[in-house]
Image (cartoon, helix red, strand yellow):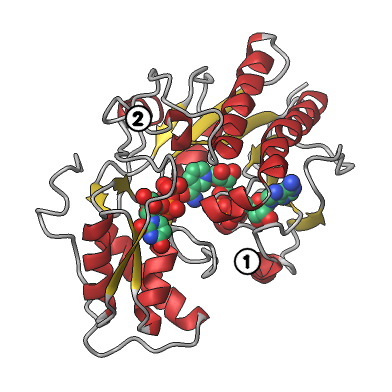
Amino acid sequence: MKRFSASKTILVAGGAGFVGSHLCDQLLQQGHRVICVDNFLTGSAANVRALQNHPAFRLIEADICKPLDPGEAIDQIYNLACPASPPHYQADPIRTMMISVVGTSNLLNLAERHDATFLQASTSEVYGDPEQHPQQEDYWGHVNCTGPRACYDEGKRAAETLCFDMLRLGRVDARVVRIFNTYGPRMSPSDGRIVSNLIVQALKGEPLTIYGSGEQTRSFCFVSDLVAGLIRLMNVDPNPGMPVNIGNPGEFTINELADLVLEMTGSNSAIVHHPLPVDDPQRRRPDISRARAVLGWEPTLSLADGLAMTIPWFAEALNLSLPKTATRRRAAQPSLVAAASL
Ligand code: NAD
Ligand code: UDP
């Protein structure tokens, strides 16, 4: 029997990570009780330290690959527990695959026992190196199942399969969000993803590392926009019964991103090119028509606006000062947002 109450008990697996900690913040602000489950594989206790004394917050250090029962009624489960940066998820690829398959299965079983609504954090990586552009949810993807990214891509695809089977069987009210590249404060400086790498390198005056030509593209979403989309998908009634892309359709080459970071940090760092990783997707941009129609959601912040909130956070976290030449840009140049439909 579902409990009907404005204030819910919500379990956030991976809640001490970059996205998860922002989600915990937001859910607590909305008046919910939050149980954060994390084994600190890539996240950190520091991300939720400010919440530790909150009366509605509970932290459980646990691995989702092992059966878990928090011993209290749960209304909703967000599954964000999985390493997300390519260097992290490739460091122990078999573990990554098991986290998506065994871990998601454990949490789905927990959701079934509690009659809790379940939201799985999937990824644009399920589209692989896409042959359709922009990517719509109906596209089945182009993934190399034997390559070095497969532990993440195929693990997330299998996790989606588990969710939709549980939904079809009437066992769990499962929802699936496909998250596109997201950035913001609390990304680990050693995370290895492009936004954190470039900002840290620029602030330290080290060369900016660009893999391949830098002409590959990504679409970058600020974390608060993503969190708003996650909460909408968890609560929308009825369950859309289909995966939903959440991301910012503004599309940038990695070279354009590097130029913007150099300008906004006022850095004189050089640029060095490294080989392009195997199976690195060449183009990525979400089609967010479904999120607009089903959730009434779209992102609100441009890349420049999001970077203006992210760069000072990294400067403080690394105890580095921003040069006087650093700029606060209100919006990206029209050429940089030409691909955006915002
Ligand atoms: P992150 O690495 O900062 O967070 C992942 C969290 O999960 C960490 O706190 C980590 O310690 C925890 N975790 C990992 N394995 C665990 C396990 N077995 N048991 C318990 N906790 C575990 O990454 P993020 O960027 O915050 O990503 C959160 C989720 O969103 C991930 O599932 C990721 O695949 C998905 N996602 C993120 C992005 C993005 O751009 N940030 C894009 C697509 C999908
Ligand atoms: N990349 C780069 N330099 C870096 C890190 C990443 O050029 O220091 C490139 C990477 O090859 C990819 C893009 O930036 O083309 C985005 O990489 P990221 O690891 O952030 O996420 P992905 O979307 O590939 O999972």
Label 1 Cα crowd, 10 Å radius (few <14 / some 14-19 / many 20+) = many
SS assignment at label 2: loop
Q: Return the residue nearer the eye: 137 or 88.
A: 88
Residue at 25% across, 62% down: 304
- At 64% across and 22% down in the image, what residue appears? 163
Q: Is residue 177 visible?
A: yes
The percent position of residue 230, horizontal first and vertical second, equals: 50, 40
Percent x, y for residue 90?
60, 48
In the image, taking residue 180 as reference, residue 87 lies left or right, namely right
* Secondary-structure class at tag 1: helix
Viewer can see residue 20 = no
Q: Please name the residue shown 28% across and 47% down the image.
A: 216
32 horizontally vs 202: left or right: right
Q: Is residue 135 above or below residue 89?
A: above
> Which amino acid type is shown beneath numbered disc 1?
Asn
- Asked whether mark 1 lies closer than 8 Å to ligand 1, one says yes
Q: Which residue is mark 2?
A: 130
Viewport quadrant of the C terminus: top left
Residue 75 lies, with reference to residue 173, above or below; the image says: below
Q: Are marks 1 and 2 in contact (CB under 8 Å)?
A: no
